[in-house]
Image (cartoon, helix red, strand yellow):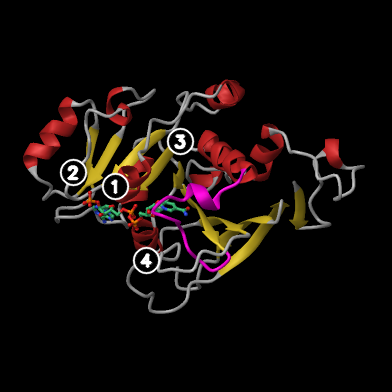
Amino acid sequence: MQRLFPSRTAPVPSSHASEGAASAPEWSLEEIAAEYAYPPVGGGAEGAARWLRGNMVASLDGAIHHGGRSQPLSSPADMRIFGVLRALADVVVVGARTVRQEGYRPAKRRRAFADRRAAAGQPPAPVIAVVSAGLELDFSAPLFTEPAVPTLLITGGGAPPDRVERARQAGAEVVFAGEGGTADPARVPGLLADRGLRRQLTEGGPTLLGEFADAGVLDELCLSIAPRVVAGSAPRIMNGPVLPDPDAYALEGVLEEEGFLFTRYRRSRSVAE
Ligand SMILES: NC(=O)c1ccc[n+]([C@@H]2O[C@H](COP(=O)([O-])OP(=O)(O)OC[C@H]3O[C@@H](n4cnc5c(N)ncnc54)[C@H](OP(=O)(O)O)[C@@H]3O)[C@@H](O)[C@H]2O)c1
């Protein structure tokens, strides 16, 4: 893997400093973790109260799945980065359709990150927080029965009470983000931060990610661009109402391996915020 941007201002991981791009050595997990470190969180002088990062992969032509799964667009480097982003996060927020479609399982405890997580006061694995209105989820699945830390369900106050009860019986903690039939995306990051889950990662899908962008709560976007073309009608990484004005993002970093680009953009706050 090689860093394409920033090319001069940031130090290249020391173990690679003398190596040319042609050899493109594999970065260690620690080096990837340093590249993707969250900004300080904790509020007050310590930094932001919380940080919501999105991570998505898209084909060259903008598709976010092939045959309903994102795996055909991924690569070993993409999966390494995906895993590190999870290992850095307190919580992984994901839409229920992605959970159903991709067969989500609990996040793994990873030995390589055990000390780092303990030192940061994090549980051994990130909490998975599923956003759902209908709560039509398989509560007998390992995501609910075998997590290292209990899975959260984020929904609206109008969620079907029998499904809420079923989720609780399965061991999930139910969080109501607003009183309506759906969760209010603007309130989700704050409710998670109230639980001490400040380093936030969302893995989409496009419906949920679009809602976070629309609500103005997405701080950062990590977008992997796969050198693949799939055509068809798969959605883009965000799918939903158009924003009144385009939101501006600043490029923070670009890594490359095997033609895959791993980009990282930070949302530029508008003067109004
Ligand atoms: N390429 C990538 O990086 C990537 C990443 C993730 C997913 N994907 C792909 O994206 C597809 C799924 O994405 P999607 O856009 O269709 O769905 P999604 O965003 O994963 O999930 C949509 C569902 O989330 C729940 N939801 C969303 N907003 C909500 C709110 N405000 N309140 C309550 N519930 C809310 C609803 O669940 P209920 O229906 O349960 O009410 C809704 O049907 C899959 O094919 C997956 O493979 C690709």
Q: Are circles 2 and 4 on residues that touch, CB within 8 Å?
A: no
Q: Is residue 74 left or right of residue 26?
A: left
The residue range painted magenta reads: 60-75
What's the mark number on residue 90? Answer: 3
Q: Position of residue 256 (x, y in %)?
A: 71, 53
Whichever of callouts 2 and 4 sits on the residue coming sooner in the sequence is 2
What's the mark number on residue 239? Answer: 4
What's the mark number on residue 96? Answer: 1
Element under label 4?
loop
Circle nearer the viewer, 2 or 3: 2
Element under label 2?
loop
Residue type highlighted by circle 1? Ala
Residue type highlighted by circle 3? Asp
Determine if the C-beta at disc 4 is less than 8 A from ligand 1.
yes
Q: Are circles 3 and 4 on residues that touch, CB within 8 Å?
A: no
Asked if residue 223 is among those painted magenta in the image, a careful observer would answer: no
Q: Is residue 219 visible?
A: yes
